[in-house]
Image (spheres, rainbow, N blue to C red):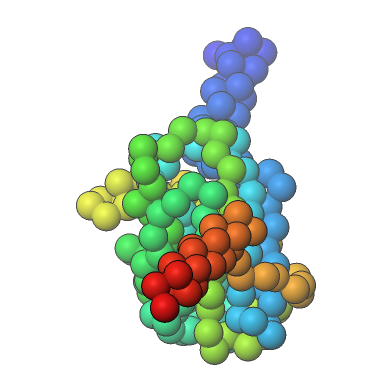
Amino acid sequence: MITKYNLVGTVLLMFFAWSAQAGVIINGDAVFDDTNDLLSLTGTYTSSSVPIDGFIFDWDGIALSLFDFSTSSLVASNIGGALSTPAPGFVSGSIMISGFLGAPLSVPVTFDFLLSVPGAGNSFLSTPIDFYLCGSCNSSPVFDYDNPDFITPRSGVLAAVVPAPATLALFGLGLAGLGWSKRKKT
């Protein structure tokens, strides 16, 4: 016989089992600069049911589901890593960023990736992105996700990484020193 306590217990167990299955992402954002072919992907995962050693981004729209990301590259990342495509277990139209120092990462983890994506045009502006977390990505992948078709990128202007002013100043001093040493010898 089902009592109200059994029912409440069953509902709570189902809720906790469901909530443990999906990663939760907050402050997710995607910006595409079609002039410079740059894509920015940012967010914070606050929970995950897998140890994180990779992030997978998958595009399901017609324009990008068959897009060849092989010429794409990771320009900048706040947590390091390297880009590979297609992601394990996925077909074309997907990328994986993995190989983080100290992986697997633990939540909360904030990511800020800047990618160069030549030839995509403005296809990103109409195609939602599925965000996935990956555990054991290169051997037997286990996936965790939050809201498939989570974000549709917005248009924006992005800047590629440029050398810091101190680096440029040091380089300039080195050139000046070389010039000075040549001048003294002649």
Residue visible at 60% across and 29% down in the picture: 15
Q: Is residue 168 visible?
A: yes
Near-viewer residue (151 or 79) = 79
Q: Quadrant of residue 85?
A: bottom left
Write the residue at 58% across / 16% down: 9
Task: Indicate the position of residue 59 as horizontal and vertical percent values.
Answer: 54, 72
What residue is shown at x 70% (from left), y 58% (from top)?
Answer: 29
Taking the image as shown, residue 151 lies to the left or right of residue 78, namely right
**Up/down of 78 relative to 67, above or below:** above
Based on the displayed image, in which of its 4 quarters is residue 185 positioned?
bottom left
Residue 165 coordinates in the image, percent (x, y): 64, 59
- Residue 6: x and y, percent? 58, 14
Quarter of the picture containing the C terminus is bottom left
Q: Quadrant of the N terminus?
A: top right
Of residues 42 and 8, which is closer to you in this image? 42
56 w.r.t. 146: above or below:
below
Residue closest to the far left: 139
Q: For this rendering, which residue is in front, 148 or 165?
A: 165
Report the number of discs. Answer: 0
Q: Is residue 43 left or right of residue 179?
A: right
Where is 44 relative to 5, above or below? below
Out of 100 and 181, give the one closest to the viewer: 181
On the image, the x and y values in percent for residue 74 come to: 47, 66
- Tell me: 139 left or right of 45: left
Let me know if residue 161 appears in the view. Answer: no
Q: Residue at (44%, 51%) from the top-left corner?
A: 80
